[in-house]
Amino acid sequence: MAPALLPGRAPAAEDGPTLKIGLIGCGVRGTGAAGEALKADKNVALTAMADVFEDKLKASLDILRQKEPEKVKVEPDHCFVGLDAYQKLIDSGVDVVLLTTPPGFRPVHLQAAVAAGKHIFCEKPVATDAPGVRSVLATVEEARRKNLALVAGFCWRYNLAELALFERIHDGAIGDVRVVYATYYTGAISRPIPPAGERPAAMGDLEWQLRHWYNFGWLSGDGLVEQAVHAVDWILWALKDQLPEKAVAVGGRQIPSPGGNIFDHFEVNYEFPGGARGFVGCRQQAGCAQDNTATIFGTQGDGRELGFSGLPFIRGPKPWRYEGPRPNMYQIEHDELFASIRSGKPINDGVRMAHSTLAALMGRMAAYTGKEITWDMALNSQETLVPAKLDWDTPIPVPSWAMPGQTKFV
């Protein structure tokens, strides 16, 4: 079956040299991304894998060998384990790198891949703090200068149904967009951290936190940044990627998580130039109502039903409902990445992936501090979450829970 490319893009020839793929981050998402990359082009091979944990790498390799036995060509000397595994993989002769580790590592890994001249699939979000975003923006420009492909894991931007909806909205089907309301109400994303007494005596802070990475802000960025960033991205997309001027927010933690330091719910109010508003509701609690949609209100109607349920439609003077195909958006991302490499016209999603990440960080800053946060404040924040030194023995204290009205903006 030919790759499902976006409308208007002709498939690129796949009879060129074999493109060697390297996977950095061998968890569930990384394993899925590698499988999609292997399906995206006839002449590709997975030749290297890297993870900090050997058990994660082996489990991922076993799954991928079962799914794509002819294309998985990872020899033992190209299974890299440890904190420097990412650099060893980048130096191993691969052409395309898949970055799917916890996002706290994304700026460093992205910078290293671009410095080495690799094409990249980069999962969202791209950082967990503003210094990381600033690093990514500089790296993105270097990727553009080197003519490297950089496809972001904001998968909805590659979904045919949503593309059709936003094209109509941008063409004025609902008039001027005034309000976007996006939800990311899900069940609990992370497994609870085991009681401290169950932590092996010999396990250091870094391994403990990496094993439970979603619960720690420096690794995940918190639920708004790691998951609901998709909803934030919908808002920016609806407003033609305008940048929000300011945000206020609320949030907190209701379901206990001893040892972690992230919230389990947020509500963010963004204000854009001209007075348009964007609202994000985010909750990650088991046993609660779930909703993963967006409604876009204009001066002449509304467009709605993004998300996994239903098909997008528009109500108003120009009614419309999507009736076309809806192939797997995760697969289309990789189809597009490899087609752009083969054609010599590489995609670079870098600026918008960094801006959507920063908009989510802006909302988190507003919720944590209880203050109004402007775009410039967020972009120039000096708060660094990622520890300067990472090794298996150095203590990594966990910051206390943010307390709105008491936590300071940095």
Image (cartoon, rainbow, N blue to C red):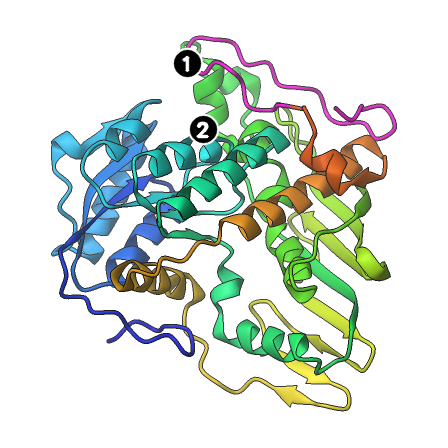
At 41% from the left edge and 61% from the top edge, which residue is drawn?
A: 330
Where is residue 25 shown, x and y percent of the image? 36, 38
At 79% from the left edge and 40% from the top edge, which residue is drawn?
A: 374
Task: Please identify the dominant SS of the magenta region.
Answer: loop
Q: Earlier in the sequence, mark 1 or mark 2?
A: 2
Question: Is 196 placed above or below 377 here?
Answer: above
Q: Nearer the viewer, residue 226 or 388?
A: 388
Residue farthest to the front, as pictured: 145
Quote the CA–CA distance across marks 1 and 2: 14 Å
How many numbered dots are placed on residues in this image? 2
Q: 10 Å neighbourhood of mark 2: few (<14), some, or many (≥20)? A: few
Which quarter of the rendering shows the C terminus?
top right
At 55% from the left edge and 68% from the top edge, which residue is drawn?
A: 308
Q: Are marks 1 and 2 in contact (CB under 8 Å)?
A: no
- Left or right, residue 113 beside residue 316: left
Q: Which mark is residue 220?
A: none
Determine if residue 210 is in view: yes
Amino acid type, residue under disc 2 in the picture: Arg
Amino acid type, residue under disc 1 in the picture: Asp
Q: Which mark is residue 211?
A: 2
Which residues are drawn in magenta? 384-410
Where is residue 30 shown, x and y percent of the image? 36, 46
Identify the element where label 2 is drawn.
helix
Question: Is 213 placed above or below 2 here?
Answer: above
Task: Look at mark 1 in the image and give the residue it sits on.
Answer: 391
Which quarter of the rendering shows the N terminus?
bottom left
- Left or right, residue 289 beside residue 248: left
Q: Is residue 225 magenta?
A: no
Question: Is 162 placed above or below 74 here?
Answer: below
Q: Nearer the viewer, mark 1 or mark 2?
A: 1
Q: Is residue 407 magenta?
A: yes
